[in-house]
Image (cartoon, grey):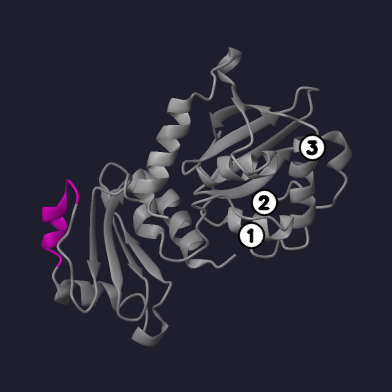
Amino acid sequence: MTEDRRLREKLAKLAAGAEALENGRRRLSPPPGGDLLTAILSEIDETILGRRITFEAEDGRRLAVEVANRRLLRLVDVPPDTADTPGLFDPLGQDSDEVLPAVVAAMRRLAEEQNSLLVATAPLDGASEPDVLGRSVAALARVAETEAPSGTADAGGGFAASISGLATALRRFDPSPSAPSGAQAARLEALDEDALAAIVGRVGPQDARAGRFILLSAGTDADALFIGCESEDIVLAALVPAARSGEVISLWRAASSAA
């Protein structure tokens, strides 16, 4: 699914009216052909910036999660009868396979016997740490033995689309380099292949570059230059706000991870 289609579906959902309730909460209903577990996964999959999302059932049970870059970073609160699994509230990473069934069970427990949930969203108290990768919705859906929400992207290939609203300029260098795009495109136009080769040379030898990156910054008040190696021969250059470089790094690592 393209990012344009994802945006259209999101706008259609909002236009259809997730009803605004008191205290900024809204009502979350199952999607057509899906259930509330799918709806919870969709909420995670649609969240780019760091957010705490709290889902509440009619009987007062809650599930609170921290999310960024369309990935579940950790659980914060779960229904009382699902909270006894060791490590359930630890940050999620590549070594979290053993706890994922308990994570999914907590989501499923909240959703069962409910027609809808109340949802409240708030920014995280602090920026998500770059080394906390979280787990993708696709990984959660596999554990749940259900289909991932429409549009869920597993790792790979989604980095440029993910930062399109964050970067001030983008340029891809491959065997047929494209022209830069964005408000600051002219600055990347000056990045010729000789200058790029000098920067990429600091990333490592060509046969070991895939998935690696380098971030060059002159301070938090200026744009930083992000150079990421999608493969041995394809490099993406982006100008991003230096103050948000942690988010960019997390997005890159998420897109480079198959989990």
- What span is colored magenta in the figure? 182-191
Please identify the quarter of the rendering in which residue 171 is found. Answer: bottom left
Q: Residue 139 carries which label?
A: 1
Q: In this view, does 63 lie above or below 85?
A: above
Q: What residue type is labelled 1?
A: Ala
Which is more N-terminal, label 1 or label 3? 3
Q: Which residue is drawn at 76% across and 43% down?
A: 108
Contact (Cβ within 8 Å) of mark 2 with mark 1: no
Which is more N-terminal, label 1 or label 2? 2
Give the residue number, with chain letter if any, for mark 3.
Answer: 112
Q: Which amino acid does label 3 sit on?
A: Glu
* Outermost residue to the top: 22
Q: Which of marks 2 and 1 is in front?
A: 1
Location of the C terminus (image quadrant) = bottom right
Q: Is mark 2 on a helix, strand or loop?
A: loop
Q: Is residue 246 above or below residue 52?
A: below
Please identify the quarter of the rendering in which residue 235 is found. Answer: bottom left
- The image shows residue 24 at horizontal and vertical percentages of 55, 18
Give the residue number, with chain letter if any, for mark 2.
Answer: 91
- Between 192 and 81, the one nearer to me in the picture: 81
Q: Which of marks 3 and 2 is in front?
A: 3
- The image shows residue 66 at horizontal and vertical percentages of 61, 41
Q: Is mark 1 on a helix, strand or loop?
A: helix
Q: Distance between the residues labelled 2 and 1?
A: 15 Å
Left or right position of 256 against 160: right
